[in-house]
Image: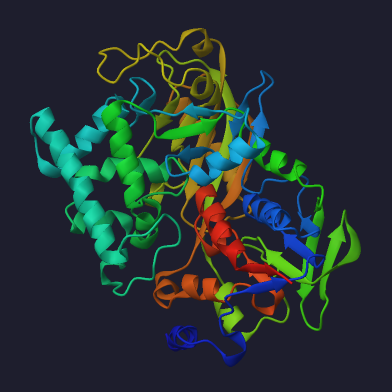
Amino acid sequence: MLWTSLVLLLLSTFGIADEPTPITELGQNDRIVIVGGGPAGIHYATLLAQKGFTSITILEASNAIGGKTKTVMDPLGFPHELGTCYAHALYTPVFDLLNQYDPTNKLIPFMPTVKGHTWVNQEGQPVTDYNKYILQLAKKAVGPKPLPELIATVNAAFQSYIALHESIFGVYDYGLPPQPSDWKPLRLSGYDFLAKNKLLAIEGFFRFVFQQQGYGSLENTPAFYMLWWAHPDMVRARQAADSQGKPWVWMLSKGYKSLWQAMLDAYPQIQVKLNVQVIQVTRRPLPIYITVYDHGVPSVVFADHVVMAIDLSRLAVLPTDLSDTEKLLYKNQSTASSFVVTLFESDATPSESVSQWWPARGVGATQGRLQLTRNSRLALFNPSPAHGAPSDPNPTDWGVNATGRQARVAYQFYNRLVQDSDGATAKAQLMTDLTAAKFGKANVRTQIVHNYFPRFEQAKLEAGVLWKIWGLQGNRHTTWVGSSVSFESILDVIAYNLQLIQRVQMT
């Protein structure tokens, strides 16, 4: 307790040597080395190249770019996303990148409101569709009402949520929220925040936008992060789209990895080195001395400025000469989740769908249970069938694509850091759950275990860690990007980078 109090006291002030620096000055030919070849690192590299810098190197420990983007191509020629997957109506920065670098990578609507698109499974209850499930939760919260009145109640709850959100953070564009002046309303889980503020009529919406993205359950999610992701503009976009029967969430026809590769291909001044594991970074005296294993061989990379695009919550190699303030900001980010994504195939089911969802799983004893499946082929090739409107009495007929062997992506979730045994444990549980769910003759093609959704504990949030990181960007010849210093979404890391690059000046 004493140590925690000391940490918070130290975080509340900046050391003399760590005063915020609003401008990062770099020479045109300075050696800029980016540690991490995920979306944040790649995007920031392209922004530096656009600004005119000539010497940009990305060091990636694995044998492929993409970080938490894991696009696996099916033998039939379409992508399976085992990491980064969706884009919603606020992803304008991503849409701009697609238009600029990868214009043939088209947006494919993902519409759970289409009849038969998403089946919802609840223990001991008949399978239902997404629309009925959302209304079930609303009825549970406010009691039985005629459908028009129930819909009006749900819409009123959304408006109440927006008003409450703006009372806490004010009005701002999507991104890192303004630092709250009063944290009391946020000292709750996401679910408890909704319950306390009488917003459970819209519980279904929040469950879907969190679990579909792999963030886990509302019961385990801090209210601060729920409100960060569910920005008022997202809610407004969803309401507008639903009222018109239009999509507000999409997948990419060629997958996200296609975009990252196209961006790198556009800039010959960006050098990407794969299979290069960073084992030590020493920033003083200059030049920065980066010790690596390059394909297993010890080597050294020199830099004038280093960009750390890494996961701070797992096996992060930090500079050896961190200041006291930096240690408080970047060391010991110990909260994240184990998100296991598996590509498997099975026989077609009698009632095929794009997705099946088990919303109550992922909490307590149900952590690690099968939480969601997504049929990539149906998602990409039957996005919005004309005969599948929500008002139709019968589920959509998905046609020939719903026959024969089907390849699907499965989600499983643990509310803790990754453990070495997660892959094997999750696979065994998955096979049990697939059998129970009647996915016949299932077999696993490949599996990815993500250390996902890194985040700060409540005490550090209230001490202002995210905003102090922002204030110190560029200090000590170091920039920090990625989900560990923002939020686990492509939109966030790109929006963060776009703000950050404005502070960089060429000397």
For the residue pair 27 and 370, the one nearer the viewer reads as: 27
Above or below residue 30? Residue 202 is: above
Q: Which residue appears at 63% of the width and 53% of the height? A: 420
Q: Which residue appears at 47% of the width and 45% of the height? A: 214
Instruction: Locate the N terminus by quadrant.
Output: bottom left
Q: Which residue appears at 55% of the width and 43% of the height? A: 94
For the residue pair 293 and 386, the one nearer the viewer reads as: 386
Above or below residue 467? Residue 176 is: above
Q: Is residue 426 visible?
A: no
Instruction: Locate the C terminus by quadrant.
Output: bottom right
Q: Position of residue 170 (x, y in %)?
A: 30, 64
Q: Quadrant of residue 208?
A: top left
Q: Position of residue 9 (x, y in %)?
A: 45, 88
Above or below residue 8? Residue 389 is: above
Above or below residue 29? Residue 231 is: above
Q: In the figure, is residue 209 to the left or right of 34? A: left
Q: How many marks?
A: 0
Q: Is residue 451 visible?
A: yes
Q: In the figure, is residue 442 to the left or right of 30? A: left
Q: Position of residue 265 (x, y in %)?
A: 76, 41
Q: Position of residue 148 (x, y in %)?
A: 12, 30
For the residue pair 64 and 31, the one nearer the viewer reads as: 31
